[in-house]
């Protein structure tokens, strides 16, 4: 598969999506997009957790619940775009990542208890915009969370963040910030 674009932008006029589209314009290759705003991504509740646990225990991943994880595992590269919400990510992206973290599909645990990656991607880019200033690392539950999953579970060597902070400040030219960041960050 090609690049998987996980679009977790919720507003039609989303600045984060604009930044992601600008990044994608420079990407040469096939792109598969998931628009989470339009997809029903249900979190694991009691019933779904039973299905999840039974699938993982039996190493049977044919339930639709594992489809996101299978698609993620096969991606050559991943781009996630999400606005910075409440020091973290939109709940729908969290629900999506919950499903992507399916043991036996995107990662496994070896005999020593260490995580083994089952994903193909060697690069994951996280794009965000935030109304306020860049938070301290300890307060960043957006890229910080995505980076933890990417490095601990999936062992993705190249995990990067492109962010436009203070996007709600009237004096901020989002376009100028975005262009500058894009020029610096994309290889
Ligand atoms: C529900 C919600 C929560 C937000 N939480 C934060 C926050 O914790 N910190 C911050 O700097 N901005 C916060 N913002 C502002 C957004 O990060 C900012 O407007 C962002 O650029 C929106 O991205 P979008 O244009 O792609 O929707 C929040 C906005 C919303 C709607």
Image (cartoon, helix red, strand yellow):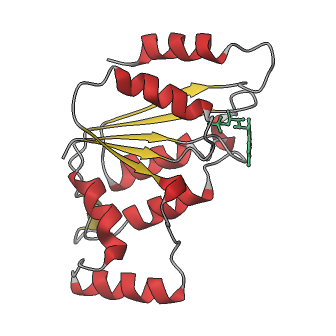
The percent position of residue 54, horizontal first and vertical second, equals 33, 88
Q: Is residue 178 left or right of residue 30?
A: right
61 or 14, which lies in front?
14
> Is 153 drawn above or below residue 164 in the view shown?
below
> Is 55 drawn above or below residue 170 in the view shown?
below
The percent position of residue 75, horizontal first and vertical second, equals 24, 48
Q: Is residue 94 left or right of residue 158?
A: right
Residue furthest out toward the front:
12
Residue furthest out toward the right:
170
Q: Residue at x 74, y 31 (%)?
A: 131
The answer to whether any part of residue 116 appears in the image is no
Q: Residue at x 53, y 49 (%)?
A: 145
> Is 2 drawn above or below residue 37 in the view shown?
above
The percent position of residue 101, horizontal first and vertical second, equals 39, 63
Q: Is residue 15 left or right of residue 181?
A: right
111 or 80, which lies in front?
80
């Amino acid at each position: 598969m090609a690049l998987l674009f996980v679009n977790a932008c919720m507003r039609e006029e989303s600045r984060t999506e604009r930044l992601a589209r600008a990044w994608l314009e420079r990407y040469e290759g096939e792109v598969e997009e998931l628009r989470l705003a339009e997809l029903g991504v249900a979190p694991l509740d009691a019933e779904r957790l039973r299905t999840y646990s039974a699938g993982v225990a039996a190493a049977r991943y044919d339930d639709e619940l594992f489809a996101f994880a299978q698609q993620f595992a096969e991606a050559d590269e991943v781009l996630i775009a999400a606005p910075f919400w409440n020091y973290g990510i939109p709940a729908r992206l969290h629900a999506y990542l919950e499903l992507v973290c399916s043991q036996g599909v995107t990662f496994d645990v070896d005999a020593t208890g260490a995580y083994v990656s089952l994903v193909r991607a060697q690069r994951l880019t996280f794009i965000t915009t935030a109304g306020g200033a860049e938070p301290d690392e300890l307060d960043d539950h957006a890229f910080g969370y995505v980076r933890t999953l990417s490095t601990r579970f999936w062992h993705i060597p190249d995990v990067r963040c492109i962010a436009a902070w203070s996007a709600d400040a009237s004096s901020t030219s989002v376009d100028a910030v975005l262009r500058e960041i894009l020029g610096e960050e994309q290889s």
